[in-house]
Amino acid sequence: QQQVKQSPQSLIVQKGGIPIINCAYENTAFDYFPWYQQFPGKGPALLIAIRPDVSEKKEGRFTISFNKSAKQFSLHIMDSQPGDSATYFCAASIYGGSNYKLTFGKGTLLTVNP
Amino acid sequence: GAVVSQHPSRVICKSGTSVKIECRSLDFQATTMFWYRQFPKKSLMLMATSNEGSKATYEQGVEKDKFLINHASLTLSTLTVTSAHPEDSSFYICSAREGLLNYGYTFGSGTRLTVV
């Protein structure tokens, strides 16, 4: 399977809170897991990415936690700000056909209230 | 960092006409380019993958005669929607990757196509 399941569908937090978005996958052949942020009318922008041999990665206020045995990974946003309000997509990359390709989760609409 | 430029950002065309969308990698050579389609409040759906100088590989269910993809150089790929119909209205996004390694996917800013 090439499916990546993302939850929750939407999330509302207060400024300073720590929203957590979760993703799960089935195919152990996935070997690259990026998170993207998308604002309305714009293309996705890479936030942070991880490979399955690492359990955690931090970049600024964004942290990925990766649980290889559970086939789950999550995004944590520390000290969230209203400017973080956007749609977040997890993705996973796998070799298919003649190329590596990304499969996206369904997205999480995050709202950070002032 | 890597930059992918996509044009136009918005286009309105009449039903039955064709429209071309350009995707350029500005500061790197894009060995592979991807085209996605995104419906409102939905995820990105991969339409096709193209390697420079080769024919595009289309995902199942995507009409190759409707969505023509050309990747003639390492910095430019084009998507032409032929004989467009209102149901082709959507947000189209390109992505480019340098080399054949499994990382470094950079996305364009998207094109909003409206067919009237």
Image: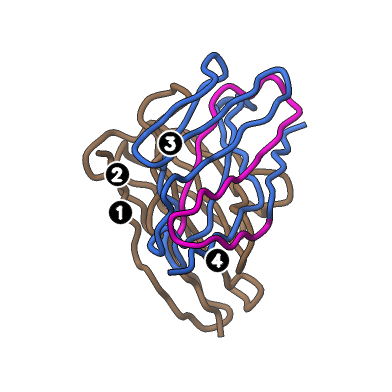
Q: Position of residue A97 (x, y in %)?
A: 64, 27
The residue beneath circle 2 is B25
Question: In the depicted view, which residue is nearer to us: B107 or B29?
Answer: B107
Q: Chain of mark 1?
A: B
- Residue neighbourhood size for the residue with mark 1, other residues' Cα within 10 Å, grouped as few (<14), some (14–19), many (≥20): many
Q: CA distance from mark 1 to mark 2?
A: 6 Å
Q: Chain of mark 4?
A: B
Marks 1 & 2, CB-CB < 8 Å contact: yes
Q: CA distance from mark 2 to mark 4?
A: 24 Å
**Mark linked to residue B5:** 1
Q: State yes or no: residue A18 in magenta.
A: yes
Which element carries disc 2, helix, strand or loop? strand
- Name the side, left or right, on which B35 lies relative to A25: left
The answer to whether tags 1 and 3 share a subunit is no
Q: CA distance from mark 3 to mark 2?
A: 21 Å
The answer to whether tags 2 and 4 share a subunit is yes
Which element carries disc 3, helix, strand or loop? strand
**Mark linked to residue A48:** 3
Foreground label between 3 and 4: 3
Q: Which chain is blue?
A: A
**Chain B palette colour:** brown
Q: Position of residue A84 (x, y in %)?
A: 42, 58
Type of residue at label 4? Thr
The residue beneath circle 4 is B82
Q: Which residues are magenta?
A: A9-38
